[in-house]
Amino acid sequence: MERVFGLEQWKAQLITFVSDTCGAVNTRAFNKNLKELKVLGHMHDTIRKGLVHELLIAQDKVLCSYYAQRDGQQNQLKRQGATVRHLRTY
């Protein structure tokens, strides 16, 4: 580290990013963490939206897996093309 960065010491810090099960992220806490990581301010919204997008994709995979296990693969394929009204009837 000293040879590369000119530092004799370095410190590690835990920075926690929290979201809920629907992908919501506390913007104030998220921006504070990004500032701590020295991310430029104009990038915060883009990064936050990308994180929320990835969280929703992960949640979708969990739900699809649940329904595939519960109903079997055949019903899962029908459900992928179903509307919200159809999903309520299952």
Image (spheres, rainbow, N blue to C red):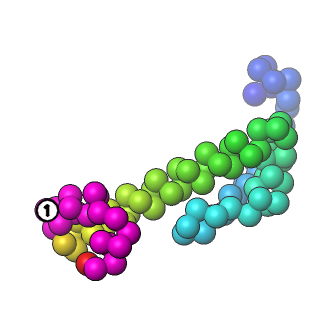
Direction bottom: furthest residue: 89
Q: Whole-percent x and y of residue 76? A: 22, 63
Q: Whole-percent x and y of residue 20? A: 60, 69
Residue 16: tell me if it is visible.
Answer: yes
Q: Main secondary structure of the magenta part?
A: helix
Which element type, helix, strand or loop, lies under badge 1?
Answer: helix
Q: Is residue 67 above or below residue 47?
A: below
Instruction: Say which amino acid is labelled 1.
Output: Gln
Image quadrant occupied by the N terminus: top right
Q: Is residue 72 above or below residue 13?
A: below
Residue under the point 45% across and 61% down: 59
Residue under the point 61% across and 45% down: 50
* Mark 1 crowd level (few <14, some 14–19, many ≥20, 10 Å Cα): few
Q: Whole-percent x and y of residue 27? A: 77, 59
Horizontal relation, residue 62 to residue 41: left or right: left
Residue designated by label 1: 74
Horizontal relation, residue 85 to residue 58: left or right: left
Q: Is residue 31 above or below residue 1?
A: below
Give the magenta part as a residue range.
Answer: 72-89
